[in-house]
Image: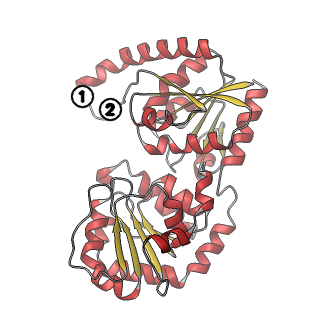
């Protein structure tokens, strides 16, 4: 049986796509190299995956004295990863990017183990810029990224969890006693919520609930008593079965993180995206959202424009043009990248 090492962590965006691929891999012994952080907590729950903890090096973009220690920490981490990989003897290493994956991929390259890495965003992150120089291919969620990055960049689409395709709206209707006589709008800001989105919904709900049924996933510890109608509006903290809520909704209002938007694309769900502003990120969500809007896949509300009026206008427009958005999504190649990426893994691990 062939062996594969997955790596990537630090955020859910670097972990969940790996798990999506692992769900669909056949005839591999699976290892996961990651830090003593979120990936260990999540991956260790899967009995078919052997998790191996590695020391990690976080890259700091700003000028700081801590940067002086990075080369020494990286050398130590690479040395540890080389020992681990020599012991495992994998046929291939697959990386989802992020600082956690850099030492594992550089170690694999030194040992002549083929590396495949994936970039979810339109712009390539720092870790993947480093890894791509040593990788067989940089797999890209966006065609534009593959066209502009370099010779070894290839358009594959994004990994998507199998559960996303099996959402059951009736579970949501029964759980919350919903009678569908209005369009259902799902508002989600991630597991921890998004304060700007939450505040905008709290301030607009009296008008929104006159026309729509709002399911508002506010994030952990963000439940709020508001002067809102109990009719046509529900709040929940977080849902492990988000696919059921996706299935129940007519449109989804969300941040523009690549995992979420590609999951919505895969199930052809019209979306309104409120990307993180540039002062809170490297601007990747803005570019992701603009690309989706350019191709007729989504509508954008920039955070600085977020208010009751823009919410009502964008929701109304998206609902009126729902069929147009679904049609545009249906025409895309590789809206789900599982098959293409696994085909590359099989090919490279066989012909290494």
How far from the left and from the top, in percent, is residue 67?
30, 24
Pointer 2 and pointer 1: residues touching (CB < 8 Å)?
A: yes
Quadrant of the rendered image containing residue 331: bottom right
How far from the left and from the top, in percent, is residue 165?
62, 60
**Foreground pick, 139 / 197:** 197
Q: How far is mark 2 from mark 1, CA to CA?
A: 8 Å
Q: Which residue is mark 2?
A: 60
**Helix, strand, or loop for circle 1?**
loop
Q: Is residue 306 left or right of residue 25?
A: left
The answer to whether residue 128 is seen in the rendering is: yes
214 to 194, vertically: above or below: below
Quadrant of the rendered image containing residue 343: top right
- Mark drawn on residue 64: 1
- Around disc 1, counting alpha carbons within 10 Å, would you say few (fewer than 14), some (14 to 19), or many (20 or more)? few
**Foreground pick, 60 / 320:** 320
Q: Quadrant of the N terminus?
A: top right
Name which residue lies at 33% across and 69% down: 235
Q: Is residue 352 left or right of residue 12?
A: right
**Foreground pick, 308 / 186:** 186
Q: Quadrant of the C terminus?
A: top right
Name which residue lies at 66% across and 37% down: 151
239 to 134, vertically: above or below: below
**Foreground pick, 123 / 55:** 55
**Helix, strand, or loop for circle 2?**
loop
């Amino acid at each position: 049986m062939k062996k594969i090492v997955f790596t990537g962590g630090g955020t859910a965006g670097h972990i969940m796509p790996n798990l999506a691929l692992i769900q669909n891999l056949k005839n591999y012994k699976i290892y996961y190299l990651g830090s003593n952080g979120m990936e260990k907590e999540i991956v260790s729950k899967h009995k078919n995956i052997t998790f191996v903890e590695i020391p990690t090096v976080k890259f700091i973009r700003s000028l700081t004295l801590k940067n002086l220690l990075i080369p020494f920490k990286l050398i130590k981490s690479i040395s540890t990863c080389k020992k681990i990989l020599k012991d495992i003897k994998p046929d291939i290493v697959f990386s989802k990017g992020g600082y956690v994956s850099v030492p594992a991929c550089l170690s694999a390259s030194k040992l002549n183990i083929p590396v495949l890495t994936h970039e979810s965003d339109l712009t390539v992150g720092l870790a993947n810029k480093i890894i791509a120089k040593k990788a067989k291919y940089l797999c890209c969620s966006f065609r534009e990224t593959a066209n502009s990055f370099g010779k070894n960049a290839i358009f594959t689409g994004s990994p998507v969890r199998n559960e996303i395709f099996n959402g059951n709206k009736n579970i949501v209707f029964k759980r919350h006693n919903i009678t569908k006589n209005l369009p259902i709008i799902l508002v989600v800001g991630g597991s921890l919520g998004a304060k700007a989105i939450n505040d905008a919904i709290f301030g607009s709900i009296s008008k929104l609930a006159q026309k729509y049924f709002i399911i508002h996933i506010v994030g952990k510890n963000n439940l709020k008593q508001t002067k809102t109608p109990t009719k046509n509006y529900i709040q929940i903290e977080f849902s492990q079965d988000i696919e059921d809520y996706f299935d129940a909704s007519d449109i989804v209002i969300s941040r523009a993180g690549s995992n979420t938007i590609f999951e919505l694309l895969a199930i052809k769900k019209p979306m309104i995206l409120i990307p993180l502003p540039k002062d809170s990120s490297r601007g990747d969500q803005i570019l992701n959202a603009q690309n989706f809007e350019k191709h007729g896949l989504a509508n954008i509300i920039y955070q600085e424009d977020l208010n009751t009026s823009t919410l009502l206008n964008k929701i109304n427009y998206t609902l009126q043009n729902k069929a147009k958005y679904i049609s545009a999504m249906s025409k895309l190649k590789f809206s789900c990248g599982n098959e293409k990426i696994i085909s590359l893994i099989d090919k490279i691990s066989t012909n290494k």
